[in-house]
Amino acid sequence: MESGMKILVQKFGGTSVANLECMKKVREKVQAGLNKGYKMVVVLSARSGETNRLLALASEWSSTPDPAECDSLVSTGEQVSIALFTMLLKDAGIRARSLLAWQIPIITDDDHGNARIKSIDSQHLRGYLDEYDVLVVAGFQGCTESQRITTLGRGGSDTSAVALAAALGSVECEIYTDVDGVYTTDPNICSSARKMDRVAYEEMLEMASMGAKVLHIRSVEFAKKYKVPVRVRSTFSDDPGTLVTQEDSSMEAVLVSGIAYDKDQARVTLHDLPDVPGVAAAIFGPLSEKGVLVDMIVQNTSLDGHTDMTFTISRKDLKQTLAIMEEVKERTGATDVVSDVNVAKVSAIGVGMRNHSGVAARAFSALTQEGINILMISTSEIKITILIQEKYVELAVRILHDTFGLDWDIN
Ligand code: ASP
Ligand code: MG
């Protein structure tokens, strides 16, 4: 980093900028950064509820809202936040200005509603930091090379912040929200859930993909790629929060770091498929063409040259998947297609699994003792996932949390 300028990126979510009172708390956090000698880049979300309100408006006006116009509309929520907040800073005598993505610019591809950041003009931003002590940047938005406004997907302000932190060489990216960090599991269903002091990028990626909503998954991918330490913490307390960072040996000593779950699962089975080359491709090819994400897949061993194939998808894709599977059934000669939406996924996640065996066996025996039937299993290097009946999810989460000693701080 040239010129010795110390830069800190802070991002504040919708509940942190919801009203004047909250924004005054945000100003205190920004002031604390200034007091430590940092130049500040503050990324804001839309005020809570605003993005939903704008999206509803779009679908009220049009049955198929034009994607580019929709982005132009929904990105306004962040513009309101940054203008109001910059006024507050200026009232306190702080040298500050607001910036929309196109003014920086933050260049993205043209995948409206889900755009990816391609580049950020960090030199231009640094130029502004000579003149101002705080730059207040609209999160969630970008701009294409041909000057169209884009958005980065729901929750995308986290990604704006991490990308800015990477581009500017910020010491850390602080993500302020209304909870004081990342928990070992959902505290709403497990009262002994504990805030983690640190979590590895890879663990966080697995947790985010399982629906833990604290961080936008792409922000974690970005942070991992550019090695940006991310601190998730609360606007409304002084707790240091949770540091999302590279894994180290102390993390590996812990077997399981967190338990995640996902109720958005539907299971589909094709019975009596001919066990010949090309059958899996015949099933999953058409699904991927239609953009249906398949999660777990299990193929039974062959019996008389026939086999069953079971997989899971998001519940919103079930109707479309079943329609596709009827065609696949005709084409392959499968006997029938069955589905079940009363299923859910529970995972134990931890980088420590890489060097320890027996984690799966421990998980299975704990669930057996409670009479929970396991419908499907999948494992990766740092994760064990089971599919069970949805009604057992809370129980399974609590059992696994307890089995792996997560209610105790063993670090
Ligand atoms: N305002 C956007 C949303 O609600 C982006 C964000 O808050 O991160 O999805
Ligand atoms: Mg968020």
Image (tube, grey):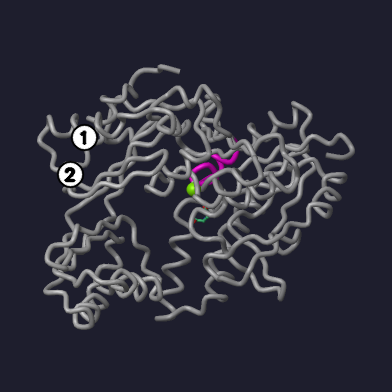
Q: Residue furthest front?
A: 304
Rendered residue at 19%/57% (across/down): 301
Residue 238 picture quarter: top right
* Left or right position of 371 against 86: left
Q: Which mark is residue 374?
A: 2
Query: Where is 407 relative to 288, above or below?
Result: above
Q: Earlier in the sequence, mark 2 or mark 1?
A: 1
Label 2: how many residues lie within 10 Å, few (<14), some (14-19) or many (20+)? Answer: few
* Left or right position of 289 against 332: right
Label 1: how many residues lie within 10 Å, few (<14), some (14-19) or many (20+)? Answer: some
Q: Is residue 20 magenta?
A: yes
Rendered residue at 56%/59% (across/down): 77
Rendered residue at 43%/29% (across/down): 355
Report x, y in % for residue 97.
76, 50
Report x, y in % for residue 372.
13, 39
Report x, y in % for residue 188.
30, 35
Please identify the quadrant where the N terminus is shown.
top right
Residue 308 picture quarter: bottom left
Query: Where is 333 relative to 291, above or below?
Result: below
Using the image as rendered, state which of residue 376 and residue 142 is in the foreground: 376
Report x, y in % for residue 298.
25, 56
Q: Amino acid at mark 2?
A: Ile
* Left or right position of 208 against 96: left
Using the image as rendered, state which of residue 186 and residue 79 is in the foreground: 186
Tell me which segment is drawn in magenta. Answer: 15-24
Q: Which mark is residue 364?
A: 1
Taken as a whole, is the magenta stretch helix, strand or loop?
helix
Classify mark 1: helix, strand or loop.
helix
